[in-house]
Image (cartoon, rainbow, N blue to C red):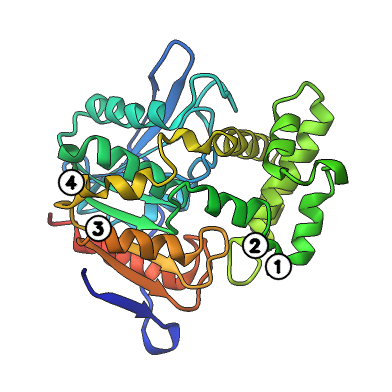
Amino acid sequence: MSPINTTTEETKQLRDLYPEIQPYKTGMLKVSEIHTLYYEEVGNPSGKPVVFVHGGPGGGSVSSDRQFFDPEAYRIILYHQRGAGDSTPHACLEENTTWDLVEDLEKLRKHVNVDKWVVFGGSWGSSLSLAYAETHPERVKALILRGIFCCRRKELLWFYQEGASMIFPDAWDKYLEPIPVGERGDLMSAYHRRLTGNNEEEKLKAATAWSVWEMATSRLYVDPASIARATDDAKFAVAFARIEAHYFVNGAFMNDDEQLLKNADKIKDIPGVIVQGRYDVVCPARSAWDLHKVWPKGELHFVDAAGHSRKEPGIIHQLVIATDKFRDL
């Protein structure tokens, strides 16, 4: 296995994001009879291609996601997955599975005329990046992954049923509020029923509570701006919660609970970096460690003073170092 490195903020001068940048191109790509995806390109049109794979599923990307990459070296491609962000139709669950999203990445790659690219993804984005790389390894130059989520049942139960609840009991009680006591034995299913039902008031209440729970637990220190987004932006909360619940009650549409780890031999020749917050309670470090053990070329970096979010200073530091490392690949 490659070395394990730990980032301690007190002993390092941390790298920051590259400056703000605007797209030089935006577009909409029709990927099925139902779905059309928003995408954008920033940076150097002649640069090394990299694709940013957002989390959730359903989370979309934000403007600061463009800033993890050297804009002079990279042609940076960002897009919104089915039902997320500016893709249409909004929050749609029909024809929305992991394997639809894997093939959407291939459709996007061909559409923007890229042969091979660096794939960058965090949280659910790490899951989709792995699924894509294991399906199309010949199209991936390198993987940069953060906050590893392997889509296993035990990971989902930890965050949505019992586990993280022990660390954030105050936030957990708010997460429980929309669900009657009699339905709390299977919270993901209870939420899924409300998020896919016809009662719009109940749907919004459930979407907000689901989204606030994740935002309240994603950083080492709670970020009020993230919680405000979950409470004030109904469009974001509904897509985020509906699509996540849809995927998670269906086991992320994996054929096997350990599929992403069992198929790691398919990416054995792909170099990569794994960046993991030591105190990530959304996607605990166990999954990063398990991935590191089966992917010898995945260089693992634990970030001591960090939770889950890509906005944590130590995580930004390691991700920017990783993108710099592969800009000449």
Disc 4 vs disc 2: which is toward the camera? 2
Mark 4 Cα-neighbour bin, 10 Å: few <14, some 14–19, many ≥20: some
Q: CA distance from mark 4 to mark 1?
A: 46 Å
Compared to residue 260, the image places residue 112 above or below, namely above
Residue 18 appearing in the image? no
Percent x, y of residue 316? 41, 66
- SS at circle 1: helix
In the rendered image, residue 265, in percent from the top left (x then y), is placed at: 21, 49
Placement of the N terminus among the 4 image quadrants: bottom left
Q: Is residue 68 left or right of residue 118?
A: right
Residue kind at label 3, given as amino acid type: Trp
Identified at 66% across, 67% down, the residue is 222
Report the residue marked by disc 1. Answer: 166
Which residue matches tag 3? 295
Q: In the image, what residue type sits under mark 4?
A: Gly
**Residue reaching furthest to the top:** 33
Q: CA distance from mark 3 to mark 2?
A: 27 Å
Local packing at callout 2 (Cα closer than 10 Å; few below 14, some 14-19, many 20+) is: some
Label 4: element kind: loop
Q: Position of residue 49 (x, y in %)?
A: 22, 43
Circle 3 sits in a helix, a strand or a loop, which is it? loop
Q: CA distance from mark 3 to mark 4?
A: 28 Å
User: Which amino acid type is shown beneath numbered disc 1?
Assistant: Met
- Quote the CA–CA distance across marks 1 and 2: 6 Å
